Amino acid sequence: MLKKKKVLIMGIRNKWSIAYGAAKSAYEQGAKLYFTYMGEENKEKIEELISEFKGAKAFECDVSDEQKVESLFSTLKAKYDKFDAIVHCIAHANTQDLRGEFLYTSKEGFLHANEVSAYSLVLIARKAKEIELLKEGGSIVCLTYHGSTKVFPGYNVMGVAKAALEASVRYLASNLGEDGIRVNAVSAGPIKTLSAKGIQNFSSILNVVENNAPLKRNVTTTEVGNVISFLCSPLSSSITGQVVYADNGYSIMGI
């Protein structure tokens, strides 16, 4: 599906992450991979992580800094020409704002979660358009979760941020459609990632999904990665502005 396609995966952290699942799937489908990560101190760890993907390159980028995003995209275009897809795997909330009741979310925590988890998609899309980083027919894919539409204890401000992210997907799809660029979100079922450790009683959520999803199991990073590869590929050329669920059907169940 992605033979000779250039895919930029933003926000890889470790081999248990959905970003890694997306990378593995895209690589197996023939893509040339490029990555961003947070924190220069993580450079060696990330380079070792992506070493199995022949020819892959990694770049440090703080998406809360507009100038750094613009500089990175300009560098990427100058070195590698236009890309076929960008995969946004970036989200963060302060631990204290994931605990207790949403009612007591701090203003600082609310703004932080929405800036990193939702506004970063808008910034990335805008900068990609301004320097024409993506080819016509290109794709932007981000990650969301069912907590954007339903209340999950311990998800709190991140649920609000994901709701903002999903609304952003629709507006960006409308704005970028005339450039032939598609924007979609994948709503993955719960997975044991590093980020999930910040959610209290996460294991109980896994158990509920396994017991109640139509397929009676939890989703894997590989399965979610395959959906992302599809949305990055020409096979999904008519799909934009959508939230595609990859959760073994759990989201369709009433009880």
Image: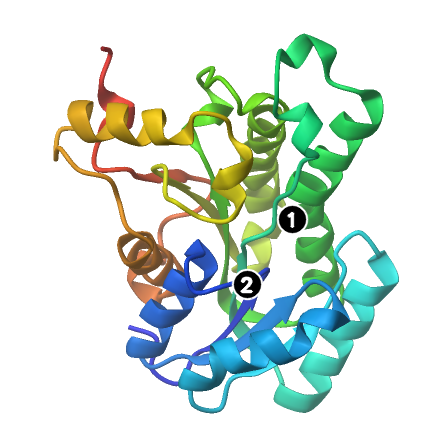
Q: Amino acid at mark 1?
A: Leu
Q: Nearer the viewer, residue 97 or 72?
A: 97
Q: Nearer the viewer, residue 170 or 150?
A: 150
Q: Nearer the viewer, residue 199 or 248?
A: 199
**Mark 2: which secondary structure?**
loop
* Position of residue 3 in the picture relative to residue 193 (left or right): left
Quadrant where the N terminus lies? bottom left
Residue occupying the point 46% across, 19% down: 152
- Residue 11: horizontal and vertical position, in percent? 59, 60
Quadrant where the C terminus lies? top left
- Residue 126: horizontal and vertical position, in percent? 72, 55
**Is the residue marked by circle 1 packed among few (<14), some (14-19), or many (20+) residues within 10 Å?**
many
Residue occupying the point 61% across, 37% down: 168
Q: Amino acid at mark 2?
A: Ile
**Is the residue marked by circle 2 packed among few (<14), some (14-19), or many (20+) residues within 10 Å?**
many
Cα–Cα span, label 2 and label 1: 15 Å
| Figure check: 217 above or below 64 | above
Q: Are marks 2 and 1 in contact (CB under 8 Å)?
A: no
Residue occupying the point 65% across, 66% down: 37
- Residue 175: horizontal and vertical position, in percent? 63, 46
Please identify the quarter of the rendering in which residue 215 is found. top left
* Position of residue 32 in the picture relative to residue 229 (left or right): right
| Image mark for residue 121 | 1
Between circles 2 and 1, the one closer to the viewer is 2
| Image mark for residue 12 | 2
**Mark 1: which secondary structure?**
helix
- Name the colour scheme: rainbow
* Mark earlier in primary sequence (2, 1): 2
Residue occupying the point 61% across, 21% down: 99
Q: Is residue 53 visible?
A: no
* Position of residue 253 in the picture relative to residue 37 (left or right): left
